[in-house]
Amino acid sequence: MIDVCLLGTGGMMPLPNRFLTSLNVRYNGKCVLIDCGEATQIAMKKKGISAKPIDIICFTHYHADHISGLPGLLLTMGNAERTEPLLMIGPKGLEKVVNSLRVIAPELPFEIKFKELTEPEVEFEPDPENMPGFSIKAFRVNHNITCYGYSMSLKRQGKFNVEAAQAAGIDRRYWNSLQKGAEVTTEDGRVFTPDMVLGEARKGIKLTYVTDTRPTDSIVANAEGSDLFICEGMYGEPDKIAKAREYKHMTFYEAAKMAKSAEVKEMWLTHYSPSLVNPAEFMQETKKIFANTVAAKDGRSVELRFED
């Protein structure tokens, strides 16, 4: 299962009742944070989420409302006596941007590792040992500076076939490793592979997060089949479509059309304009396009689980 918490839903500036957009994802005791705007720490505190166990921070882009909370978060992690390395992922220029912000957080008791994104799309497993089957895919979107969306997927192995394992004479002590997808070599030199005991792969879990962009084919393609699609809805007012186009943002209705095209299970809207006081008032028309849409509020959480 994957725990998902949308810490904040605001764009541009934090408000008293709406923090800046940031997403916290937990799997197998590991934690991934996407974006870290001002007040992210407060949003985490309100949800009882600790900063110390964050293992990966992904950045969509480097506008201040998505990264200005980073120096304070790093200091908090350092004051919590963290020593494990921290992986940061983001568009080209990541290391330069982070090191510039670290002028006010120069001494940390842990190493920061950087993975800069330069290709239109890239997929990788950040920690195969501790996060087995968990992958992150970054894909470029269309904002007025280089910006990426992220899909996180958790693969699921096929069912373990006890009869096949017994017929092949595989000792029980090797079953767990094979079930996790690892090849096993016994003391007497025999080699057993997962395909000998596992059925066809079953449906996994997929989460897609997109913000600060116009609608793009890359978003639809990468969000396809997502269990949860978290997408920018900067404007709910239909007459703000021209403004959305000018500043490379999206309306609720454009997001809903992409959710429908991608055949996602559920969409949460986020990254609202500060002028958008009550997003819920625009949901009736939005749901006509994609029924399973939620005007998300700060702190909205869900556990994404395998279907069976």
Image: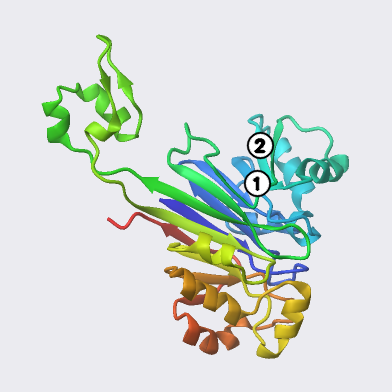
Picture coordinates of residue 102, whole percent (x, y):
83, 41
Seen in the picture, residue 97 relative to 185 is either above or below; the reply is below
- For the residues bearing labels 1 and 2, Cβ distance under 8 angstroms: yes
So how many labels did they put on this image?
2
Picture coordinates of residue 243, whole percent (x, y):
76, 81
For the C terminus, the image quarter is bottom left
The three-letter amino acid code for the residue at tag 2 is: Leu
Q: Pointer 1: residues within 10 angstroms few (<14), some, or many (20+)?
A: many
The three-letter amino acid code for the residue at tag 1 is: Ile
Residue at image position (64%, 79%) is 251
Residue at image position (49%, 84%) is 289
The residue to which callout 2 is attached is 86
SS type, badge 2: strand
Residue at image position (70%, 84%) is 241
Seen in the picture, residue 146 relative to 272 is either above or below; the reply is above
The quadrant where residue 21 appears? bottom right
Colouring mode (rainbow / by chain / secondary structure / one colour): rainbow
Residue at the far top: name it: 188
Picture coordinates of residue 272, whole percent (x, y):
68, 74
Asked if residue 303 shows in the view, the reply is: yes
The residue to which callout 1 is attached is 57
Asked if residue 297 shows in the view, the reply is: no
